[in-house]
Amino acid sequence: MQGDGQTKLVLCGCGKLHVTYGSVTLHFEREEFVLFAESIGRLAAMLKQSALNHALALKPTSNVHICH
């Protein structure tokens, strides 16, 4: 399955999932991939929310770290 041209998901004959994003490929078991995808979705939602609240200083949490 392909999404935006940069992301590809391949289900291997052995049952493993291979997720490619650009030049990076990650290998997962099915359940592991679902947990990873849900975590990424939560992080994306947090980032969107922080962009909406940019006027308010984003306070780091255990899941979000500010670099500079």
Image (cartoon, rainbow, N blue to C red):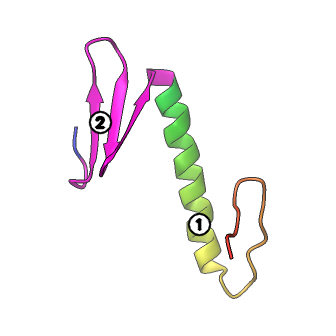
Q: Residue drawn at (34%, 14%), measured in percent from left and top?
A: 15
CA gap between label 2 and label 1 equals 24 Å
Whole-percent x, y for residue 57 in the image:
75, 81
Q: Label 1: how many residues lie within 10 Å, few (<14), some (14-19) or many (20+)?
A: some
Task: Identify which amino acid the numbered label 1 is placed on.
Answer: Leu
User: What residue occupies the far bottom of the structure in this picture?
Assistant: 55
Q: Give the quarter of the figure containing the C terminus.
A: bottom right
Q: Are marks 2 and 1 in contact (CB under 8 Å)?
A: no
Q: Is residue 2 above or below residue 65?
A: above
Q: Secondary structure at mark 2?
A: strand
Determine whether the residue tagged by mark 1 lies in a helix, strand or loop: helix
Picture residue at 30% right of the left edge, 49% below the top = 23
Magenta span covers which residues? Answer: 3-31
In percent of width and height, residue 47 lies at 59, 66
Examine the structure image and report whether residue 8 is included in the region drawn in magenta. Answer: yes
36 above or below 44? above
Using the rendered view, name the quadrant where residue 48 is placed.
bottom right
Mark seen at residue 9: 2
Q: Residue furthest top?
A: 14
Q: Is residue 62 above or below residue 68?
A: above
Q: Quadrant of the N terminus?
A: top left
Q: Residue sitting at 27 percent across and 30 percent down?
A: 10
Few, some or many residues within 10 Å of mark 2 (<14, 14–19, 20+): some
Dot 2 amino acid type: Leu
Q: Which residue is mark 1?
A: 47
